[in-house]
Amino acid sequence: MTSCRSVILSALFWTAVAHRRASKRRALQRTHVVGAGKTAPHLVFWHLEKAGGRLATSLINDAMGGRGGFTTIHEWGVYTPTQERRFVVAPMREPCSYYVSEFNWGVSGKGFLRRALLANVSSRERIARWYADGQNSDLAIARAAFRAWVTFINGADGGVRADETCGLLGARLWAAVLDPVAGLRINRRNCNRADVKAIEQGRGCSCPLLDCMRQAQNTTRRACRTRVRGFGSELDVRTRDICWIRTEHLVEDLAMCLAAFREAGGRVNPDFRASMHWKVQATDSAFYSHGQTSQDRLWTCADLVDPHSGAIIYGYEGEIAARFNMTCCTRL
């Protein structure tokens, strides 16, 4: 009797599992039509280096059934608009925290920014010294190296005024998403080695990602500054065609963006919120919830950013911080 009962319960359980899997497949395979003559949008994710992109990409993939189905714009790439209807998801991070994370990444010997900077023969020795000093256990030495690094990459040491150009974060935003043609144009003008392999081998452009606005012409700098100053930060794709996810609120913002994507006709698992919750609980997500990523374990924002370096960062990135209501970890 007990054996028969167990068999029946087992059969019911697996029947329910099969039914749920079939429902998920039908949801993913269903053709979405949004309005008259409009097809389902294609999701595009801009992977801004050091802004929680690895976790976001994993969560998006899970939400879309683990089969991909979306396009990622990597750190070295640009968003190329097409006739296809697209839904762009883009991360944004508080500038001071972002600069510290990029510096830590370079100190660890990683990142495309480090490769690009070290490819410039004229500045290679200084850059290598600053990254080496970032490994020093003496906070004063590391902080001085960070301040010099921030000054250099923004061109503040060469008389490039903050009100006439973009900083590191703004330039990446402009060249990758807001005006991707500009990212291609400056590379063509300044060099012919913009491919990733060349960058990795130290043969690439000194600024393949617009990581050094000091290399740009004045017209390019002003164009970037004007575009970044005027862009909207609404976390609503219906008004700007870009759904923003703040690193400091990555999971909540991404859930909102996926919900908006689904509302617009995109293919997302009906229970994507539950799967996101499980994934975050199963990973080292404490850093993300505090605006840090898993690599931010060398120096914290409060360690490296002093009023001087913070003022430089916000001089170049202040509009972005204001748009997203962000504040630096240090009183400026």
Image (cartoon, rainbow, N blue to C red):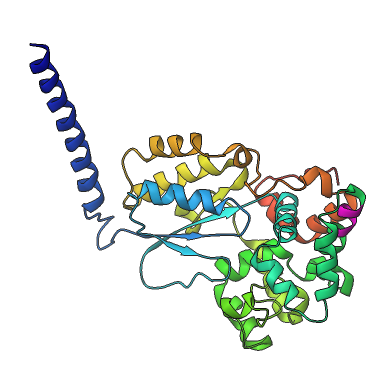
Task: Tell me which residue sits at (63%, 40%) in the image.
Answer: 287
Apparent side of residue 130 relative to residue 83 in the rendered image (left or right): right
Does any portion of residue 147 appear in the rendered image? Answer: yes
On the image, the x and y values in percent for residue 167 come to 74, 65
Quadrant of residue 315 in the image?
bottom right
Residue at the farthest top position: 1
Q: Is residue 19 left or right of residue 90?
A: left
Q: Kindly tell me whether residue 154 is visible in this rendering.
A: no
Magenta stretch contains residue 144 = yes
Residue located 87% across and 52% down the image? 143
| x 48%, y 36%: residue | 282
Quadrant hosting residue 165: bottom right
Query: Can you say which quadrant of the picture contains the N terminus?
Result: top left
Please tell me whether residue 12 belongs to the stretch shown in magenta.
Answer: no
From the top left corner, tell me how far across and down residue 137 is, in percent: 86, 48
Magenta part, dominant SS: helix
Left or right: where 142 falls relative to 255: right
Residue 145 lies left or right of residue 192; in this view the side is right
Residue 142 horizontal/vertical position (percent): 86, 53
Above or below: residue 102 compared with residue 259: below
Q: Nearer the viewer, residue 93 or 72?
A: 72
Q: Position of residue 169 (x, y in %)?
A: 68, 61
The residue sitting at 25% across, 54% down in the picture is 32
Magenta region: 141-145
Q: Relative to 218, does residue 16 appear above or below in the rendering?
A: above
Furthest-right residue in view?
140
Q: Is residue 137 above or below residue 167?
A: above
